[in-house]
Structure formats: structure tokens, C-alpha cells
Amino acid sequence: MPIVLLNLLVLFEYRRTSLSSATDFYLCMIGLIATGIRYAGLTLVALNIVMLWRWARQDSFVKKIWRSLIQLIPSAILLLWWRQHLGIGDSETNQRPLVWHPITLENLQEGLINLGAWILPISHQAMNGWVLMLCGVMGGMLLVGLLCFTLYELFRGTTHRVFPAPTSQLHDLTRIICIFSLGYLLFLVCVRSLFDPNIVLDPRTLAPIFLPLICALVASYNYIKEKRARLALIVLLLIIYTLPLKQVRHWLQISYFNGIELNDKRRLSSNLLTYLRACPKTAQVYADQPWNLNLEFKTMVYWLPTYHLYGSGLADPHYQTKIAQLPDQADLIVIEDSKHALIDNIERLKAFRQVYSASDGLVWQHIALERDICR
């Protein structure tokens, strides 16, 4: 998120001053760093190219092409290197080939609800029934407003103006934010439909546009000329952001004192992790949720075979073969989901014996290891 804000501010500064080689370099480096981190990187590169073409009208066509290549080539090289090296030591389970799996209505509905929840700050425990519907409506209104404003700004003439702009600088900043936000959302839909069916439009994925959109919403206050309308808007916002504080406070306290996700103290102090921390750090581990265990071992924790490949959603034709090969590859097998379909298959493998069984998971150890290596 800080990288996104930095890129938007550099673009805004260029609009205020003039384009220079230093600006090209700054935008190129920011886009390169963002490309190596999250999906927002490619959207930033595309935004930089669009804005440079739109604003540098006095430049020749060749110069515009050159500026575009300066933005594009470093990120393209990084992506090619990433493509060649990211899967080293990994299995095909989480590889993401080009496969058409269109985004579903459930995914879109979840995205709209999460967008609306930014405007209506209500804890997840309270989001049900009419609250979910209200968040979805607010998210839909935000998306429609974003789409209309962005399309107008991209295709309007240079002199004709429908929306009154209080200052040209504020208008330019709002335009940059809206183009980036809409481009990022469209990019997520494309990646979800073509590469990764596991992308969900949750707050974590939408985080790069959170602060920029809030800034754009605050800036839109200056477009309201009527004093009564301004006063009514302020009162409405005070009501919206004051009423949920009691609900949000509880969630914030849980997040601060107990941690969330991988830093959840309940997870960190679980019996399963306590048991696995006593295992040799160089043990070869296969797990149903490897991301939970990667930090506990020096070697990479591999995905257990799954009937449907996690990355593509396609059926794995080599599923049974991979299960049969586990005795030659794994020292430990860890399953945290007690209802996992693979449990029966592992129990039938004579090469493993169960060494841990509890409500938080199951662990099997290869029988070639003479003793319980985790004790």
C-alpha cells in the first residue's frame, strides 16, 4: 500500500511540474518494486504509461514510445525471471497455467460487500441480513461512481467539463486515483478468470485501493457547492462512523492483543505447532496447508497431492501416482483439516505411522525413521 501511494504521488507531482528523466526513473523503480510484491504492480505500470501518454501531448510519438518502454521493460524482465524461478523446488499443485475459469457472481458479490464495508465500518460478526445487503449496495454505488467518473475523464474533451473542479490539482489527483482503482479491479477480474481461481476479492486483496479511494471520497466533498448539502454530508458521515465504533473496538482489541492469521496467538500456542517445533528443521514435510508451516522448517514444506490442483482448479491426472510416491519423498505428513479426503489414502500407505492425533491436526512419520523424531 505505501508503494501504491508513493507512485500516485509521483504522478501527481509530475502533473504539477513537468516530466523529466528523474520522474521516468522514479516511476520505473516504483513499478518494478510493486511488480515483485503484489498484483498492484502491473496496474501501476499500466497507469504510468496511460498518464504519460495523456499528459505528454507535446512529445513526439517516438518519445512517447521510449517513455513507455522505460516503464515496461524492467517489469517485463522481472516477470520473465519470476516465471523461470518461482516454481523451483515446488510442485505443480500451485502452478497457475492459462485456463479459463470465469469469475463467479459469488466472487463479485463478496467484492462489492467488502468495498461497501470500507464506507460502513461494521465488524464481520455483525455482517448478516440487511447489513450485508446495505454493504453490497454501498459497494455497488461506489463501483458505479468510480466507473462513470473514470470513463468520463478518459474520454472527455480537453475543454468541455461537466463536473466542476474546485482546483485543477485536486481534480488531477482524483483522476489518477480513480483510473488506478478501476484498473486494479479489472486486473483482478482478469487474473481470477484466466490464471488463479483462488483469488477472492477480500479486504487483503483490495487493500492497495483502500486509502486511495478514501482520499478520492474525501476530495469529492469539494465538488459540493451547496452549504446545506455539505453540512448534511458531514452529519451523515459522523453518524455512520460513530455508531459502529462499539462493535469495531472489540475486533481491534482481538487483533492487537491476540494477533490474526499466522500471528494468531492461539495458533502459535497450539499443540500441533508445539509438537512440530521439536521436529528436525531439515525434515521433509508435506502438508495440506503448507503456508502455515513454512516458517517452522528450514526446508520447503510441500503441498500434499490434491484431486483438484490448487492453482488451476483442474483435476490432477497424476493424483494417485503422487500419493504412491509419498513414501519416497516425505519424512512427515501433516494434515490440519480433520475431514480431509486424503486421510484414508495416507492410512493405507504402509510406509507411514501416525505419531500425533488431536483436534488441531494429524501427523504421520515415515517408518524408516526408527523413533519419533519430534520428541
Image: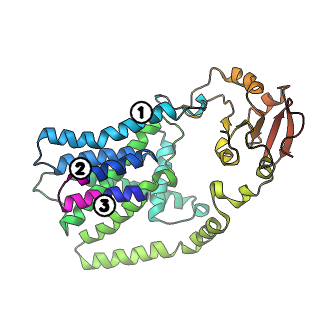
Looking at the image, which is closer to me, 224 or 371? 371
Disc 3, SS: helix
Q: Is residue 65 magenta?
A: no
Looking at the image, which is closer to me, 255 or 332? 332
- Which is nearer the N-term, disc 3 or disc 2? 3
Q: Which residue is mark 1?
A: 80
Report the residue at 24% width, 68% height from top: 223
Give the label on residue 9, or none.
3
Give the vertical position of 84 relative to 108 (above or below).
above
- Which is nearer the N-term, disc 3 or disc 1? 3
- Which is nearer the N-term, disc 1 or disc 2? 2
Image coordinates of residue 304 in percent, x first then y, are: 69, 33
Mark 2, residues whose alpha carbon is within 10 Å: few (<14), some, or many (≥20)? some
Dominant secondary-structure state across the stretch colored magenta: helix
User: Disc 2 residue type?
Assistant: Met
Select label 3 or label 1 by which is in front.
Answer: 1
- The magenta stretch is 9-22
Image coordinates of residue 342 in percent, x first then y, are: 74, 32
Report the residue at 9% width, 56% height from top: 159
Report the residue at 27% width, 56% height from top: 11
Q: Which residue is mark 2?
A: 51
Select label 1 or label 2 by which is in front.
Answer: 1
Q: Find out whether the residues at labels 3 and 2 contact each other: C-beta distance under 8 Å.
A: no
Disc 1, SS: helix
Q: How far apart are labels 3 and 1 at the CA level? A: 28 Å
Q: How far apart are labels 3 and 2 at the CA level? A: 13 Å
Q: Quadrant of the N terminus?
A: bottom left
Q: Tell me if residue 147 can be seen.
A: no
Looking at the image, which is closer to me, 59 or 136? 59
Q: Is residue 16 magenta?
A: yes
What coloring was used for the rendering? rainbow
